[in-house]
Amino acid sequence: MKLIDILSEATFETYFMQVIIKIDKQVVNNTEVYNQVRGIKDVIVIKIVSSEKLEAMSDDKYAYELLEIKFINEGTPQETIKMIKENALKITGLVKFFPREKSVLKIRNY
């Protein structure tokens, strides 16, 4: 079997979701958390979205942020989201990671 045949059989799906995160500002800065989320397996892209409501909830101790995440699906989207959440919660200073389930959207198959 040729390598091109193997590669052409491999397909994967990409998805989009929104996530609300809570960061302990006394432990870590926001940029460090964003960079570590980008490094999680299967995460392709993250985008930080401004939200006046979340900014109003933030205080001297905690920052709330809305992220848009694109990810490669392995298994079911729910399993992949669960794995991403578990890995994200290992990040120092990241207190909460709330995937917005209604925002999950399949982008395409490759």
Image (spheres, rainbow, N blue to C red):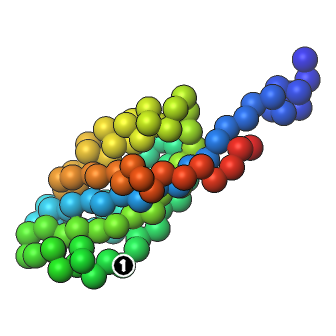
Q: Is residue 51 above or below residue 27?
A: below
Judge left or right: residue 76 versus residue 89.
right
- Element type at marker 1? loop
The quadrant where residue 21 appears: bottom left
Q: Give the residue type at disc 1.
A: Ser
Residue 41's spot in the image, x, y percent? 48, 41
Q: Is residue 12 left or right of residue 41?
A: right
* Picture quadrant of residue 23: bottom left
Residue visible at 41% across and 71% down?
48
* Quadrant of the frame with the C terminus: top right
Where is residue 6 drawn, in percent x and y? 82, 26
Q: Is residue 36 left or right of residue 12?
A: left
Image spot of residue 80 (x, y percent): 46, 37
Q: Residue tagged by mark 1? A: 50
Visible residue check, residue 8:
yes
Foreground residue among 20 and 26: 20
Q: Residues within 10 Å of mark 1 (few under 14, many from 20)?
A: few
At 19% from the left and 70% from the top, the residue drawn is 63
Q: Nearer the viewer, residue 29 or 54?
A: 54
Residue 37 is at least partly visible in this image: no
